[in-house]
């Protein structure tokens, strides 16, 4: 029996069903895009829906044959993944190709450690599963689950614009929404970005398939409103977990958090080349901790006073210790989740203007915003050993988070739209 043929899990026949269609790997709120999707799923569930997470892509497993899910995914009444079997908090790949990829990838990694970089040991990155063309069996997977929801199906949500292909698999009268995340056609990585390239006309056509488009920041909501006038453009930024008080942290302790994406790696490389040497020249005791998979891109021996910690179990402790959060992004789109999280944590933040894209009008006074390398270095040096100055900036950051990024405020528009569905 396939996953799509099973009976619904924990179904409550009194609640309408919202199907969230996603091809991204969501195991916890452990990266910006997953955290954003989970926050919207909670809002939809609180709006009265039984939310199903439907993942019609065996490619999202990559070379990881077993996925482990945190309790944050308990918000979903049902979770089905094409080509994987759910067993408690685990999902096990059914395809031998996934297990073979896991085995060969591990052997190549071991070989590189023993023999160094060799051509035959080179590891080829997995495709960006979110943007892969849809296959007939993926459409069939969505159709089967939509059929099981039957008359209770009231809302279908596309996670990223690429999943709007699934809209043909649900009844025409079903309300259809897309979580935009960011504008792919506006990404400007000068060829460095690791994700799909999408021209503006194609993106507008895909967005226009929806009844609602959920935008993460105001500039992109305005773009949708102008480019797709027949679509409801809803603003729903990432909510912040709000700290009880500002936290100035420790002197000369910096923190950067980021996954292995081009905006993070390019921005951090720019910082290491142009800003960090200036800081080291004036404050040689300053320490930078880099958390997340972005550290894979760097030669640790060439970055003085930098610790690449990878994924950590206790992010809260690192937030507590950090005196300054940095975000030296040089390109990107969407709302920068690292910014929202740092504001909510009540931290002093030094960031580029790109980091504030779409929220500059409400965040500029709460962040030390600098694009020039010397100016950014000067801002860091000014704050590094001045706990009073950090506390003042951290207080502004926390006030900004409370005013603009609480769950209640950021989800107000979406909650109203959900309530209107029930009224109709």
Image: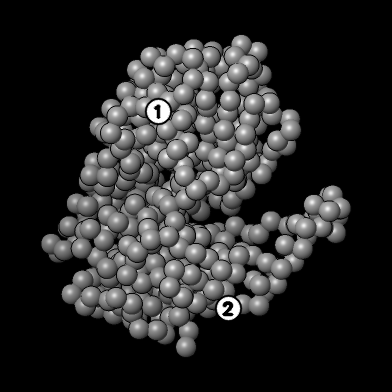
Measuring 31% from the left and 66% from the top, which residue is drawn there? 51
The image quadrant that residue 98 belongs to is bottom right
Q: Position of residue 253 (x, y in %)?
A: 52, 25
Left or right, 270 with respect to 392, comes to: right
Residue under label 2: 94
Check the image and name the residue furthest to the left.
423
Q: Is residue 192 visible?
A: yes
The image quadrant that residue 402 belongs to is top left
**Mark 1 residue crowding within 10 angstroms, few (<14) / some (14–19) / many (20+):** many
Picture layout, residue 295 above or below residue 58? above
| Quadrant of the drawing holding the C terminus | bottom left
Residue under label 1: 347
Picture layout, residue 50 above or below residue 386? below
Q: Nearer the viewer, residue 334 or 341?
A: 341
Left or right, 261 with respect to 153, comes to: right
Measuring 43% from the left and 30% from the top, which residue is drawn there? 356
């Amino acid at each position: 029996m396939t996953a799509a043929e099973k009976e619904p899990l924990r179904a409550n026949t009194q609640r309408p069903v919202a199907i969230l269609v996603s091809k991204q790997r969501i195991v916890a709120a452990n990266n910006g895009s997953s955290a954003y999707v989970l926050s919207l799923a909670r809002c939809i569930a609180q709006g009265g829906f039984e939310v199903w997470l439907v993942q019609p892509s065996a490619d999202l497993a990559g070379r990881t044959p077993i996925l482990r899910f945190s309790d944050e995914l308990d918000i979903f009444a049902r979770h089905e993944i094409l080509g994987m079997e759910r067993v408690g908090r685990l999902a096990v790949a059914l395809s031998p190709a996934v297990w073979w990829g896991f085995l060969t990838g591990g052997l190549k990694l071991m070989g590189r450690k023993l023999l160094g970089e060799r051509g035959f040991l080179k590891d080829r990155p997995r495709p960006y599963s979110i943007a892969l063309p849809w296959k007939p069996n993926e459409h069939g997977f969505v159709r089967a689950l939509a059929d099981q929801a039957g008359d209770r199906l009231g809302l279908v949500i596309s996670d990223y614009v690429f999943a709007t292909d699934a809209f043909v698999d649900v009844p025409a009268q079903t309300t259809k929404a897309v979580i935009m995340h960011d504008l792919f056609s506006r990404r400007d990585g000068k060829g460095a970005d690791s994700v799909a390239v999408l021209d503006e006309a194609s993106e507008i056509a895909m967005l226009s398939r929806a009844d609602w488009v959920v935008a993460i920041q105001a500039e992109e909501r305005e773009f949708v409103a102008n480019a797709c006038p027949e679509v409801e453009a809803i603003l729903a930024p990432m909510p912040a977990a709000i700290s009880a008080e500002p936290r100035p942290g420790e002197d000369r302790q910096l923190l950067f958090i980021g996954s292995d994406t081009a905006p993070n790696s390019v921005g951090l490389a720019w910082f290491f080349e142009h800003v960090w040497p200036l800081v080291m020249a004036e404050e040689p005791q300053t320490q930078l901790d880099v958390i997340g998979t972005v550290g894979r891109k760097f030669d640790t021996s060439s970055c003085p006073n930098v610790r690449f910690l990878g994924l950590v179990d206790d992010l809260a402790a690192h937030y507590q210790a950090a005196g300054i959060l940095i975000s030296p992004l040089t390109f990107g789109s969407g709302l920068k989740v690292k910014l929202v999280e740092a504001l909510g944590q009540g931290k002093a933040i030094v960031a580029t203007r790109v980091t504030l894209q779409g929220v500059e009008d409400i965040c500029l006074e709460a962040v030390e915003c600098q694009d020039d390398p010397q100016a950014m270095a000067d801002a860091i040096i000014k704050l590094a050993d001045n706990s009073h100055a950090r506390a003042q900036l951290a207080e502004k950051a926390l006030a900004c988070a409370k005013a603009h990024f609480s769950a209640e405020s950021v989800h107000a528009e979406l909650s109203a739209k959900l309530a209107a569905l029930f009224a109709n």
